[in-house]
Image (tube, rainbow, N blue to C red):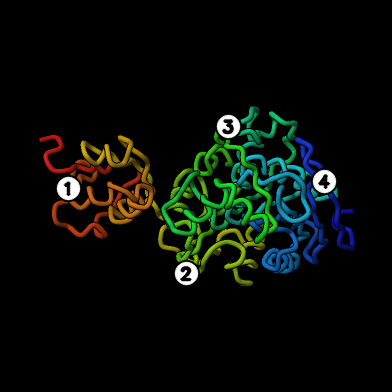
Amino acid sequence: MPGADRVVRTTLVTADGVPIEARYEPGSGPAENGAIVVAHGFGGSCDRPAVRRAAAVMARRAAVVTFSFRGHGRSGGRSTLGDREVLDLAAVVAWARERGHARVATVGFSMGGSVVLRHAALTAGPAPLGGSGGLREHGGRAEARPAAVAAVSAPARWYYRGTAPMRRLHWVVTTPAGRLVARAGLGTRISAREWSPVPLAPYASVPLIAPVPLLIVHGDRDPYFPLDHPRMLAAAGPAELWLERGMGHAENAADEALLGRLADWLTGTRRHDGPPTKGAAVAAGTIRYWAAAKAAAGTAEEPYAAETLAEALDAARERHPGELVQVLKRCSFLVDHDPVGTRPHDSVRLTEGGTVEVLPPFAGG
C-alpha cells in the first residue's frame, strides 16, 4: 500500500556505498498525488527547521521524503557540492518507489536544485553525462527518473563568484580553513578533491529533462545568484519560470504560500497558476566580444538569457567582475546588427536567437 500510516526513518546506501539518512512521511493527500522528495541546500539536513517546515506543508498534498546529502546531518561521506549527490537523490527516489509510489516528484533548493536538474537529465538518457556522479557509470537505475522537477534558487552554471556570499562560499569549500569552519559551524564535511571531470552544468541539463515537467523558482532578492541564473535555466529548454517578489535564497526564504504552490505544481493538481513574472518571456541568444572586450571577458562569445540589453550587460558584469566592467563603459553595441546608439539600454529588447555585439573603440574600424 502506498503511504504507510507512520513516519519511517532509515539509512539508505548509494550506488557508491555512502550511507544516507532518509525520512518518509505518509502525508494526507490523495494516493494518486504520489510522493515528493525534498533535496536541501548546502549546509542543510533533513532535520533542519526550514526542511521540516517544507515537509510539513507538502505533506498536506502528498507523501514526503526528506534526506541528508552526503557530508550533511547523519549521512556518511563528504559533500562534493552537487556532483556525486545525484547518487544520493537516486537512492532516495528509488526508496520512495519501493514504498509503493508510482509517481515521485523532486524539488531541490540551491545546491539541491542543481542536483535535481542533473538527476533528471542523467536518468533520461542511455549513457552517463559528465561528472564522477554519472548514474549509470555507478550503477544507477532508469526507474529513478522523476515525474516532475522543481529547482528553487539553483545556480545555472558552476564556479560563479559574482556575489559576496558566493565568494565566501568558495573560500569555505576550497580552503582547509574554510572546510574546518563548515565542519564546526554547520556540521558539514566537505571533500577536498576537485571535480574530475566537471559535472554537467545545470543549464546544460535542462534540455535533457523534457518531457518531464520542469519548474524554475527564484527570488528577486536572492543574495547568492542574481536573476540571470533562473533566466538562463528557463531559456535552456522547456520550463516554467516563477520569479518571486521579495524572496531571498532557498528553503530558508520559502514561505508557506510558496511551498504550498510548489506542492500543488509537483503533484500535478495545479500546473500553471504561478504568479505573473517578469522574465517569463526571457530571450536566449549570443553575446560577442571584440578586441579589448574579448580580452577582458576571456572569451569571444557566450550565451545571454535576458529580456533587454541592460539585463544582458548586467549579467556579463556579474560573470566577469574585473576589467570587463570598465571596458563596457567605453563600448558601443549592436543588437541584431542594429546600432544601439544613445538609446537607454533597458529599452532595447533582445530577441530569441539574436546577437549582441560588444565593440570597444576602434574595434572593427
Query: Could you tell me if the residues under marks 2 and 3 are in contact, i.e. CB atoms within 8 Å?
Result: no
| Vertical placement of residue 243 versus 292, above or below | below
Cα separation between marks 3 and 1: 39 Å
Question: Is disc 4 surrounded by few (<14), some (14 to 19) or many (20+) residues within 10 Å?
Answer: some
Q: Secondary structure at mark 2?
A: loop
Cα separation between marks 4 and 1: 57 Å
Which residue bears the numbered disc 1?
332
Q: Earlier in the sequence, mark 3 or mark 1?
A: 3
The label number, if any, that marks residue 53 in the structure image? none
Which mark is in front, 2 or 3?
Answer: 3
Q: Earlier in the sequence, mark 2 or mark 1?
A: 2
Image-quadrant location for residue 358: top left
Answer with left or right where residue 229 lies relative to residue 288: right
Query: Which residue occupies 72% across, 31% down?
Result: 138
Q: Secondary structure at mark 3?
A: loop
Which residue bears the numbered disc 4?
12
Query: Which residue occupies 78% across, 59% down?
Result: 63
| Residue type highlighted by circle 3 | Ser
| Residue type highlighted by circle 2 | Arg
Cα separation between marks 2 and 4: 38 Å
The label number, if any, that marks residue 245 in the structure image? 2
Cα separation between marks 2 and 1: 33 Å
Query: Which residue occupies 63% across, 47% down?
Result: 116
Q: Earlier in the sequence, mark 4 or mark 1?
A: 4
Cα separation between marks 2 and 3: 38 Å
Which mark is in front, 3 or 4?
Answer: 3
Q: Earlier in the sequence, mark 3 or mark 4?
A: 4
Which residue bears the numbered disc 3?
196
